[in-house]
């Protein structure tokens, strides 16, 4: 989980998989030492860890093809170098692994109607804005493909959109 914060999302994912009989070793990357410490309490009990670093530094330290699933929920819009980060993720994700992305939907009707008052504008911490098309272009430029982004994932009335990225063959 890149930008794992306190570790709540990944811990919930881990527990859901565990309830289905699948073990997940949680790995978080978090730049805030305070939040990373809170996540580490959860992850270390489950045999995982938190890397206290920027996304770029944390991913760079991971071995090739060592991660099955990457979650970037409400993170990629904050990353100053999203193309470089996805290139690095391409190296660390296993061949059948995936990257799940949740970002504000710049193509939402709410953004069009609300204009400058749209809730997705958060200066200065949001440095990227994605539409379904620009997210697909970014994926393609970094040797990923959008495996899933159905209508519900990019619903025009929603301020957020989701995508599952997989490595290109």
Image (cartoon, helix red, strand yellow):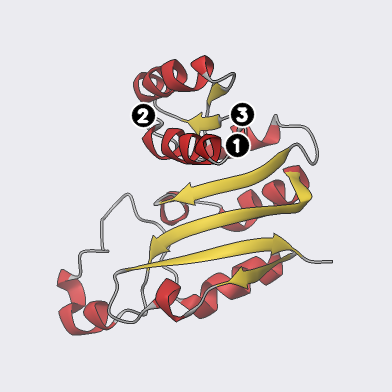
Residue 21 is labelled as: 1
Q: Residue at x 20, y 78 (%)?
A: 115
**Where is mark 2, residue-wise?**
6
Q: Is residue 79 visible?
A: no
Q: Residues within 10 Å of mark 3 (few under 14, many from 20)?
A: some
- Residue that appears at 36% across and 74% down: 106
N-term-proximal mark, 2 vs 1: 2
Residue 150, position as x, y percentages in the image: 50, 78
Tag in front: 2 or 1: 1
Residue 16 visible, this angle:
yes
- Decide: is 144 above or below 113: above
CA–CA distance between discs 3 and 2? Answer: 16 Å
Residue 111 image-quadrant placement? bottom left
Q: Are marks 2 and 1 in contact (CB under 8 Å)?
A: no
Circle 1 packing at 10 Å, graded few (<14), some (14-19), many (20+), is few
- 135 with respect to 104 (left or right): right
């Amino acid at each position: 989980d890149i930008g794992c914060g306190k570790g709540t999302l990944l811990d919930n994912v881990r527990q859901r998989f565990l309830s289905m009989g699948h073990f997940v070793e949680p790995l978080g990357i978090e730049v805030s030492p305070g939040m990373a410490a809170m996540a580490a309490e959860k992850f270390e009990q489950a045999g995982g860890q938190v890397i206290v670093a920027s996304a770029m530094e944390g991913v760079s330290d991971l071995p090739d093809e060592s991660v099955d699933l990457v979650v970037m929920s409400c993170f990629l819009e904050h990353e100053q170098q999203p193309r470089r980060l996805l290139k690095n993720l391409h190296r660390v994700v296993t061949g059948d692994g995936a990257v799940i992305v949740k970002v504000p939907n710049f193509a939402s009707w709410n953004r069009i109607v609300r204009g400058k008052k749209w809730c997705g504008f958060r200066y200065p911490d949001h440095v990227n804005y994605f539409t379904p098309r620009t997210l697909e272009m970014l994926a393609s430029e970094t040797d990923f493909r959008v495996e899933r982004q159905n209508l519900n994932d990019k619903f025009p009335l929603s301020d957020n959109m989701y995508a599952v990225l997989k490595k290109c063959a």
